[in-house]
């Protein structure tokens, strides 16, 4: 009953029909082109933001020679990588080695199919939107595994195994954080979740946002969780043996996943395309860039964690907090079935602060020998 | 029309994947074929308007089970030559033939009744009501959860040091 009432409370008023601009195939063609252009442009933009922003934060210049402010640096990098020789190790499993970049990259692009760029402006408004995202995202782990195995290189293999360990562990708090959002929104469709955000969910679900952000960074192996390509230990991790076009695919995949996670965070927690004055798609892009900027910021601020710290953080810190967050959210939904009131914003912030303080007291590594 | 084409593509891919699992010597490649088979099954669910089931199929089978299978394969030896046949070859063959016979018999003798009703949309809310709502399968869901918990605890106890 609660589910039904919260479903009815969201007035469905999509300005764009599901087959805009007329016809299934035109819709498909238009949005496929939009998604590819959006993803590739933002990947280039993100590479530029990351290199220049990181340079700025580390008190150096960063690439500033190619084009104005070094804006053409990603283009120069891409050209350089594409012209390099494609080397396959003699003992490699050739088919697996060749397929791995494709299997890893395709899911990253497929995620954007359900991300709304405006009210109803998306390739497919699936009912199971966010479940689709989680499911598709889990496929790229197989691509990384194939790369690690197919290279027949111990560093690739170790990197891939670390990657799998982190992806499998961090998926649990991420999914539980998403479950909190789905409870509040009363739908799994990303467009409906955006429409339900009269109060952005970062305020109603601050703990969920934090869990999702940390878990998301770990799942796409961004620093401080980039253990599977920890240069000092594993040379370049799973893509040690890749060069040329195939390496470019992995590089592209890493940033496409960063775009995807930023887009999902913007949609789930920051109100997606909603915002005053500016057109919806611009709001959306601005929010995505903002989230990515926070990711760069954490990357430059925090040192890389150790593998046991990575596992302990997932299982002993994020997982219990995610469970508590889900229970607290469920209770709030039971008390206020129609819509959550503003008064919950300070309460939830206080709950988050209290839980994090409490758990950081309890959180111990290595049977208490190394306290964090 | 589109659904028929999709079904045949998915069916062929799924059966080829399943054959690959059985026939390939390299067990790493065999496990990748298993992933392909799981994905084809998820596609068939999607064509049958079971979108939630399709999503869960990909999430659980491809994202978790296949990954764990591959991880287990990494820890075995002789990955490229696969499992060599041993003296259980003939008993295994007999059991497989028996299983095939039982499954074929069951398939051929079932009444495959087709509902005339249009498929339910959206499925998620209805599914949740059946599972957790009144008169639903809440007891079965909880028994499954307890069983899984017991299995996890058992596994931990078995592999624990000391």
Image (cartoon, coloured by chain):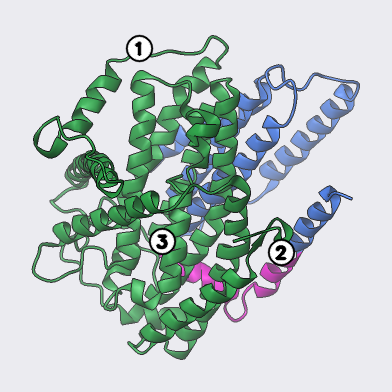
Chain colours: A green, B blue
In the picture of the structure, the residue carrying the numbered disc 3 is: B118
Relative to the observer, which residue lies in front, B6 or A55?
A: A55
Q: Residues within 10 Å of mark 1 (few under 14, many from 20)?
A: few
Judged from this view, the residue extending furthest toward the front is A59
Q: Nearer the viewer, mark 3 or mark 1?
A: 1
2 or 1: mark nearer the eye: 1
Q: How many marks?
A: 3
Disc 2 to disc 3: CB gap under 8 Å: no
Q: Secondary structure at mark 1?
A: loop
Report helix, strand or loop for mark 3: loop
User: With respect to residue A168, does B19 lie above or below?
Assistant: above
Looking at the rendered image, the disc whose residue lies closer to the viewer, 2 or 3, is: 2
* Vertical order, A115 against B100 (above or below): below
Q: Which residue is painted at 25% across and 41% down in the image?
A: A60
Q: Residue at x 21, y 42 (%)?
A: A45
Residue B124 part of the magenta segment = yes
| Contact? badges 2 and 1 (CB < 8 Å) | no
Mark 2–mark 1 distance (CA, rounded to whole Å)? 53 Å
- Is A2 situated left or right of B152 in this image? left
Q: Residues within 10 Å of mark 3 (few under 14, many from 20)?
A: few
Q: Is residue A51 above or below residue A176?
A: above
Residue A142 position, x and y percent, is 52, 36
Q: Which residue is mark 2?
A: B144
Q: Is residue A264 at least partly visible in the picture?
A: yes
Query: Percent x, y for residue A37?
Result: 19, 40
Q: CA distance from mark 3 to mark 1?
A: 55 Å
- Name the spot of residue A190 as percent of width and height, x first: 33, 62
Highlighted magenta segment, given as a residue range: B122-146
């Amino acid at each position: 009953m609660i589910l039904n009432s919260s479903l009815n409370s969201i007035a469905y008023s999509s300005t764009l029909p599901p087959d805009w601009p007329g016809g299934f195939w035109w819709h498909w063609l238009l949005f496929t082109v939009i998604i590819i252009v959006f993803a590739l442009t933002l990947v280039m933009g993100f590479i530029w933001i990351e290199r220049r922003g990181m340079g700025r934060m580390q008190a150096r210049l960063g690439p500033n020679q190619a084009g104005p402010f070094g804006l053409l640096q990603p283009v120069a990098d891409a050209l350089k990588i594409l012209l390099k020789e494609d080397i396959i190790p003699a003992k490699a499993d050739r088919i697996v080695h060749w397929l791995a970049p494709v299997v890893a990259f395709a899911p990253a692009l497929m995620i954007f199919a359900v991300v709304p760029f405006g009210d109803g402006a998306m390739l497919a408004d699936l009912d199971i939107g966010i479940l689709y995202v989680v499911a598709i995202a889990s496929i790229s782990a197989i691509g990384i595994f194939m790369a690690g195995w197919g290279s027949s290189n111990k560093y690739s293999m170790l990197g891939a195994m670390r990657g799998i360990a982190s992806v499998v562990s961090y998926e649990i708090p991420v999914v539980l954080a998403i479950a909190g959002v789905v409870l509040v929104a009363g739908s799994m469709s990303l467009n409906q979740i955006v429409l339900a955000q009269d109060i952005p969910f970062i305020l109603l679900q601050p703990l969920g946002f934090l869990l999702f952000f940390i878990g998301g960074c770990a799942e796409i192996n961004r620093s401080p969780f980039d253990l599977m390509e920890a240069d000092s230990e594993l040379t370049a991790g799973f893509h040690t043996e890749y060069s040329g076009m195939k390496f470019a695919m992995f590089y592209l995949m890493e940033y496409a996943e960063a775009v995807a996670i930023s887009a999902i965070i913007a949609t789930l927690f920051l109100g997606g395309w909603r915002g005053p004055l500016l057109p919806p798609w611009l709001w959306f892009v601005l929010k995505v860039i903002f989230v990515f900027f926070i990711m760069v910021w954490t990357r430059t601020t925090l040192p890389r964690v150790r593998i046991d710290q990575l596992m302990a953080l997932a299982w002993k810190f994020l997982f219990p907090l995610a469970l508590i967050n889900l229970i607290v959210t469920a209770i709030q939904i039971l008390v206020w079935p129609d819509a959550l009131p503003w008064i919950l914003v300070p309460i939830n912030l206080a709950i988050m602060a209290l839980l994090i303080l409490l758990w950081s007291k309890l959180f111990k590594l290595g049977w208490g020998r190394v306290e964090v | 029309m589109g659904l028929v084409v999709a079904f045949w593509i998915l069916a062929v891919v799924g059966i080829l994947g399943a054959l690959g699992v059985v026939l390939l010597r390299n067990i790493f490649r065999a496990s990748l074929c298993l992933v392909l088979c799981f994905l084809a099954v998820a596609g068939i669910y999607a064509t049958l308007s079971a979108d939630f089931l399709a999503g869960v199929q990909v999430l659980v089978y491809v994202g978790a089970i296949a990954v764990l299978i591959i991880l287990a394969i990494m820890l075995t030896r002789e990955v490229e030559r696969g499992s060599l046949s041993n003296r259980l070859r003939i008993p295994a063959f007999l059991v497989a033939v028996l299983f095939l016979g039982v499954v074929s018999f069951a398939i051929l003798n079932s009444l495959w009744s087709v509902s005339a009703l249009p498929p339910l949309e959206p499925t998620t809310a209805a599914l949740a009501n059946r599972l957790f709502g009144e008169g639903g399968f809440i007891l079965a869901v909880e028994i499954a959860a307890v069983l899984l918990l017991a299995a996890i605890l058992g596994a931990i106890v078995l592999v624990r040091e000391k």
